[in-house]
Every structure is written in structure tokens, then in C-alpha cells.
Image (tube, grey):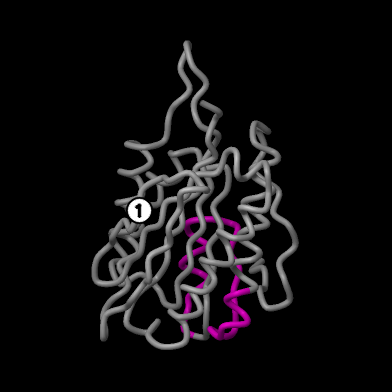
Amino acid sequence: MSRRLPVFLLLDTSGSMRGEPIQAVNNGLQVLVSALRQDPYALESVCISLITFDIEANELFSLTPLDQVQIPEITVPQAGATFLGAALELLVDRVDRDVIRTTDDMKGDWRPLLFIMTDGSPSDLQAYREAIPKIKHRNFGNIVACAAGPKAKCEMLKELTDNVVCMDTMDSAGLSQFFKWVSASVAAGSSSAGVAAPTTLPPPPPEVHVVI
């Protein structure tokens, strides 16, 4: 079996994502998977896991080879909190369970990539902050967090990773560009797998701004 590149997607499905935003996310995920399937490196190595978070965190599917990924229709509750801390705790559990470690006898998976998108800030702030050192201990190849829309809090995401981007709007065009950029970032990760340094991210599109 070839070494895998695990890619974890954590997506906000809180009540404020109702309507066009969640529809744009659904469309964007299809764009992401379709684009990656055009890349031979990604097709050979990438496995994707999808976790959503609102009033609870849910794993929609565990690490799945790219050619077998079936994106379900994501829905959101009428209203509700943004339990990003719970999502990170679930992620830690899944990384420990599903990512294959390198041993003396066997090469394990490549360092996993993590992409987070939220349109708010963590409702479970204490759990979020308690989960951050656990995430940093898991040796991700890169962690990218996107603050989408005017209510998203970039400074909260900065506590987790230096790679924070923001989007001013939550429309279909902007989110589509974001997911295309995630696809390009994953493709870059798959082609440079095995490099000790963090994955170099491609330049984001105009709709996505890097937070310094």
C-alpha cells in the first residue's frame, strides 16, 4: 500500500450557516474533490475525513481514499452554537485512531493536513483552548484556518495556527474560490509529501485574504 496523505476538513455547520452559505459549502466540497481527482499525485495518496461542528461535533466520514469519497449533503440546524473545541477533541481522537505512525518496521502516513472553516468564534472557548496543545502535538504538516464572513474571529484562530485566512463574504463565488484553493493546497502537499518542512501553500485567490 502506498503511503497516504491524510487530509482533515473541519467545517462550521452552526445555525448562521443556513441558506446560501451551506449550499455554497456543499458545492465547494464537490469542486474540491473533483479538482483533486484530476491530480495523479493526489489520487494516489490523498485520504479525506470530514468533521462538522455546530451544537455538537460529528464525523461525517473517516479517512477515505480520494477515489472513494462520497460527499453527503450537509445540512445545518435552525440555530445553535459553534462547538469548535468539541470538533478539535474529536479530531485528536480520530488522528490517534486512524493515522498510521511510522515504526522501525514500516513507513507510516505522511504528516496530515488540516483545514478549518468557521463563520463565528468557538462557543466552547475553554474546550477550544484546551484542545490547541493537543492538536499541535499531533505533528500536522500544515493547519489552515479560514474565518469566513463578517462575524468570524481571526484572532481566535490565530491561537491555533499562523496560517489564518479570511473572507469578507459567504457567497457561492467566494466559497467556491476558497475550496479551489484548498484543493490546490492539498495537491501541493501530495506532490511534496516527505519534505520535512511544512507544506508551502499556493497564493490564495483575491477573495481570500491572508491574516498577518
Report if residue 59 lies within the magenta region.
no
Amino acid identity at mark 1: Phe
Secondary structure of residue under mark 1: strand
The residue that disc 1 covers is: 61
Q: Splitting the image into 4 quarters, where does residue 119 fall?
A: bottom left
Provide residue 206's location: percent of width, then percent of height: 73, 76
Query: Magenta span covers which residues?
Result: 151-176
Question: In which quadrant of the rendered view does residue 23 lie?
Answer: bottom left
- Residue drawn 52% across and 21% down? 107
Is residue 158 one of those drawn in magenta?
yes
Q: Residue furthest top?
A: 105
Q: Position of residue 19 (x, y in %)?
A: 41, 88
Q: In this rendering, is residue 119 above or below 188? A: below
Q: Nearer the viewer, residue 55 or 69?
A: 69
Residue displayed at 45% across by 71% down: 118
Q: What x and y, as percent, mark residue 44?
A: 60, 38
Quadrant assignment for the C terminus:
bottom right
Does residue 87 lie above or below 148 as drawn? above
Q: Residue at x 55, y 34 (%)?
A: 110
Is 167 on the left-hand or right-hand side of 51?
right
In the image, residue 167 above or below residue 85: below
Spot occupied by residue 74 in the image (x, y as percentages of width and height):
37, 71
Q: Nearer the viewer, residue 57 or 139?
A: 57
In the figure, is residue 127 to the left or right of 19?
A: left
